[in-house]
Amino acid sequence: MPPIARIEPLTTARALRGPFDYLLPPELSDAAVGAVLVVPFAGREVLGVIVERSETTDVPAEKLARPRAVAGPGIPAELVALARWIADEYCSTPARALGLVLPPGAGRATRPRVSSRSALVAELTPSGRLALALAAEGAPLPGEPPNGRSGVPGGPRTSAKPVRLTPKQHTILSTLQTAGPLPAAQTGADHGTLRRLAARGLLLLERREQRRRPVHAAIGQRASAQPPRLTAEQERALDPLIAALNAPDGALAPADRRFLLHGVTGSGKTEVYLQAAAAALEAGRTVIVLVPEIALAPQTVARFEARFGDTVAVLHSQLGQGERYDEWMRLRRGEARIAVGPRSAVFAPLEQVGLVIVDEEHESAYKHEGDPRYDARRVAARRAHDAGAVLLSGSATPRPESVHALRRLRISRRVDGRPLPPVEILDMRDAKHPLHPVTREALGDVRRAGRKAIVLVNRRGWSNFLSCRSCGKVWQCPQCDVALVLHRSQRAVTCHHCGHAERVPSSCPDCGSVTLARHGAGTERIEQELIEAIGDPSFPVFRLDADTTATKGAIAKALGRFDAAPAGVLVGTQIVAKGHDFPDVTLGVVLDADQTLRFPDFRADERTFSLIAQLAGRAGRGQHGEGRVLVQTLAPEERAIVAAAAHDSDGFVEGELQRRELLRYPPFASLIRVVCAAERAADAHAAADAVARLVDAPGAQVLGPAPLFRLRGRERSQLVIKATQRRAAVQAVAAAVDAVARTAVGRRASLSADVDPQ
Ligand code: ADP
Ligand code: ZN
Ligand code: ZN
């Protein structure tokens, strides 16, 4: 029987669902699961991935199409399985899910856009080394080898003819001796000279693959290669991890290999990751380390690189495509055995994965917002499960879901033994100014002491919205039903949902009044308020938000500047609260802490709690004594705020789990959201209604359709499905969405399903 391959063509069309049987021509008969091939499909040539091999097919042999060629490196079979699981789990298609696991740059083009880069490299041979040594001693030179290329084991062969080196040749050889192998272009010699030296066997000249090495930001200089002595609590957390890593196959149930490292900020979680990773390598396994966002985790990356050197490959979108390809290939070939990166690094092409680490597991950045809308934390758990690996999630403010499902390892104290900084709640209900008097005074103290402060404002721009003082008109986005935000430095009001921007109005188009009111304060205005309140140019204010960090690498640079400054204030959106380790920060301030509570989302409390707790974690890490944290809020009695002020992570999570069980929210049920968007509100609603009627699964409760605010000119309607039997519900929703999409009403709308929406 001829060799058959079941191939998934990588096409975006939802309706064309594979896999399809192809006949492998003799030159491709060895192609295995995971091979990426150019295949004829629907009259075109597209990339396809082999998802199964078979000896039999129902299709008559003469009707089978044949793949044309191999297109670049293939992917490990386990990633093919993972992608197929993702397609089912997140209401997507196998083609789209396979798109996630392809080598960087493969995309949908039939020819890979990226490949290895090679260059002509010159390397000193043993003969060349000897020639140099003898020239230095002034001894008579031995003869040259009779045939050109040398470098064979056993050292140089000699003959009677003496070697003579011109000064120029001598320089080239000694450059190579000190520098090691160099691209020909960097030797300072022309090709003719190099070729003549190569012909004499003094150097080796050949084409070699060049690794494009990513260069990372310089924060994290404090990283050390030597593991420190663990604290007793770190030790207690590490022990069960090592035991699980070394447990023989089948000795542990999958649930016993899933851990949550719940340790306060500064408790040395990274050190536990590092030592667990070392143990996994020692056991002959590989490691995946996920971080929420590379720009915010340069220190974690630096610590892994300092400890494990070239064994670490870093994968992320800020790398050039060539660099990403090279890092990917190093993992694929087993040259690198630890992959570090944001959520997509969960697809690192490693085999024998023994440990999957998810750092800062509470971060919503782990959720991917394009199709497939996967959650890297869930994918990490699945990948660990399939590989028989240990899953290690870590956070100071873990999700209730994780506390519920994982084996918890606690670290309750900071490494340096310092207490967590005291948190004071400042009631802003009668405040006239965006900065509370206590906040101003505290900033003054920091300035006088020459230390640093971090101020968190959860909104960028100058003010939240503009209104007319005479008629009350509010400036809104013409495309979306949301208010426009004033950005003073850009002289524009902009929409934070679609990017629409217009000039700041000077008068009201409705009533002609020229008195406009600005409401609320964003990062831009707070930056100005801080500069005025501090009134000291030698105490700089750094702003960090999406407006100041639009360019590649800007976040790392901004953080680097703040790190390098002797003193100052960092003001910005949520990004200022994330995992940085600045030892001189003695004050953390959260402005408008209840702002996150006002989102109509069951995770609002969790977000608010974690934001305050994470910011508190930035303060008081150095040798300058205790830090201090101030929380300005209009809702001083809110549970999330009170719990954060008391550093009561356990109490908060417990209360949160009780509430969620009562209301049947995750982890006690799964949520699936379906959004229908259309030109007309009636069509969006009709499509959502049609889906609602079709969803039929045991234990599934359908809420809606409910109108959603207009976005980018599209009216929207949404359903939320609460499901106790996740698999059945996801399948029912996927089937309903597909069925409605094929009807007349469905064609007037675009439908998308989101499992575990954020
Ligand atoms: P977390 O990730 O829990 O917030 P980190 O891993 O950033 O904490 O650790 C805080 C600091 O303590 C880091 O500077 C780290 O190098 C240091 N550290 C961690 N473990 C130890 C240890 N056992 N001994 C000394 N210093 C440690
Ligand atoms: Zn008006
Ligand atoms: Zn808009």
Image (tube, rainbow, N blue to C red):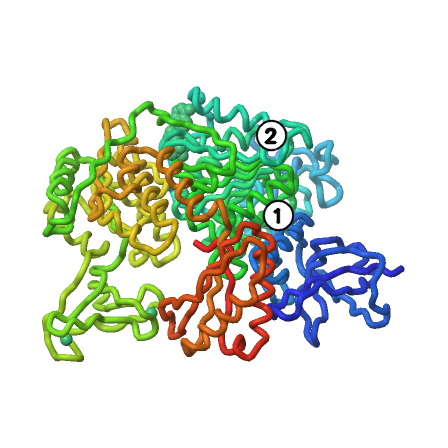
Residue at x 27%, y 27% (from the top left corner): 623
Instruction: Determine the secondary structure under disc 2.
Output: helix
Estimate the x, y position of residue 699 in percent, counting from the top left.
55, 53
> Label 1 vs label 2: CA separation?
20 Å
Residue on which disc 2 sits: 245
Ligand 1 has an atom within 8 Å of the beta carbon of the residue at disc 2: no
Tags 1 and 2 in contact by the CB under 8 Å rule? no
Q: Residue at x 44, y 64 (%)?
A: 704
Q: Nearer the viewer, residue 337 or 191?
A: 337
Q: Quadrant of residue 62?
A: bottom right
Locate residue 495 relative to residue 95 in the image: left or right: left
Mark number displayed over residue 349:
1
Look at the picture and state if 601 lies above or below 496.
above
Q: Nearer the viewer, residue 659 or 755?
A: 659
Looking at the image, tell me whether mark 1 or mark 2 is earlier in sequence order: 2
Looking at the picture, how far across and down is residue 174, in whole percent? 54, 38
User: Can you tell me which quadrant of the image ligand 1 is in?
Assistant: top left
| Quarter of the rendering containing residue 230 | top left
Amino acid at circle 2 = Leu
Q: What percent of the width, then of the height, locates residue 35?
A: 71, 56
- The foreground one among 514 and 638 is 638
